[in-house]
Amino acid sequence: MIAADVTSTDLATIMLDLGRRAKAASSKLATASAERKHAALIGAAEAVRMRKAQILDANALDMDNAVQKGMTKAFQDRLLLTDGRLDAIVDALRAIAELPDPVGAIISEWDRPNGLHIERVRTPLGVIGVIYESRPNVTADAGALCLKSGNAVILRGGSDSVYSSRALVECLRLGLKQAGLPEDGVQLVPTTDRAAVGEMLGGLDGAIDVIVPRGGKSLVARVQSEARVPVFAHLEGLVHVYIDRSADLDKAVSVTLNAKMRRTGICGAAETLLVHKDVVPTHLKPIIDALLAKGCEIRGDAMVQSLIVEAKPATEEDWKTEYEDAIISVRVVESLEAAIAHIEHYSSHHTEAIIAEDPAAVEKFFNEIDSAILMHNASTQFADGGEFGFGGEIGIATGKMHARGPVGVEQLTSFKYRVRGDGQLRA
């Protein structure tokens, strides 16, 4: 770690060196064989498996600091590594290793009347800067996905996960070294000084090709405001579940419960529940009772409060809040159209779900809601690159340019055109 009293000049020098090394590594990773990248990822997975004890010890230091700082239980849950969660990281690294190599893949090809054959081919982006808050698994996912897609990556994790992230990066770098690839393909910013983020947003003298922020609203807002390079924005997960008039009761209860309470601190957790007025007599209380039984606080509109004794009044701010905790806001809506209007007004355009048996209602919901991920009769907690078959994700991109939804290996590539001729001249 860099000393806390590092000067701004020293920090700038250190960060520029980080960028230069990443740029040099990216040119080698861009042309690395699929076999070497596969070997690097399998080696990294094995390193995580073999170093479980050391990684858990490092995470214990981060957890102790989080407890001393009075961090919320939801925050601590996001930060915590367990034996099972490390097994999941190992599995994710292996799954990413087994994905088809995107680099050089032909996206499309065609022939022109003049005999030219044109191919659109995937290429790496170059150097990716990932700025994220205290989720150690992002360290492994981001490093692995960038490696698989032929990119170098500079990781700037949250100060609260610094020991965990460092231990995981060491595993990724060991995998690179064993495969004969440059270790600088994966680098962790070696300071918790927030000024390092500003250096990254400036692009490190042209070294960084794209920035991926993953964290709270203030972090993403800063990145979007200050970045001098392209940004794949991962906004907050203000996620909605809508219970349609045609909803099956058992599905409505089980899906809502899982969407909210499986893990309350992840971006795919439901934060607002909308219930069609026609099923309030049959569906509202069973759903709320299931949530209450799991310790979830209910904040409801006037009708919900009149029917649920435990419900607290929902304010205007509640409809705009990503709780990341065992709290959910609940509103009764007059119609599907009213549910869509509520979602379009308050949503962060991350993930929304409809529980319904009416195909027409589902199609209307899917067609009229402009969010990155839409679910039908399934938990919003499936909003995850691993669950989509991507092996993992750097984040859920909520913008509309280049990448949207889970950002996996394909989304971390651009493309170029290869044009093959036989002496053609343009008139």
Image (tube, helix red, strand yellow):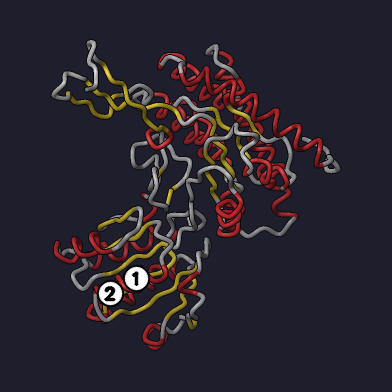
Q: Is residue 303 left or right of residue 125?
A: left
Q: Are marks 1 and 2 in contact (CB under 8 Å)?
A: yes
**Three-letter amino acid code at the position of disc 2:** His
Q: Where is mark 2, residue-wise?
A: 283
Establish if 18 lies above or below 4: above
Within the image, what quadrant is residue 54 found in?
top right
Total numbered circles = 2
Q: Where is mark 1, residue-wise?
A: 287
Residue 344 position in % (x across, y down): 35, 68
Within the image, what quadrant is residue 202 found in?
top right
Establish if 56 lies above or below 23: below
Q: Is residue 405 visible?
A: no
10 Å crowding of disc 1: few (<14), some (14-19), many (20+): many
Q: CA distance from mark 1 to mark 2?
A: 6 Å
Q: Quadrant of the N terminus?
A: top right
Q: Is residue 361 left or right of residue 80?
A: left
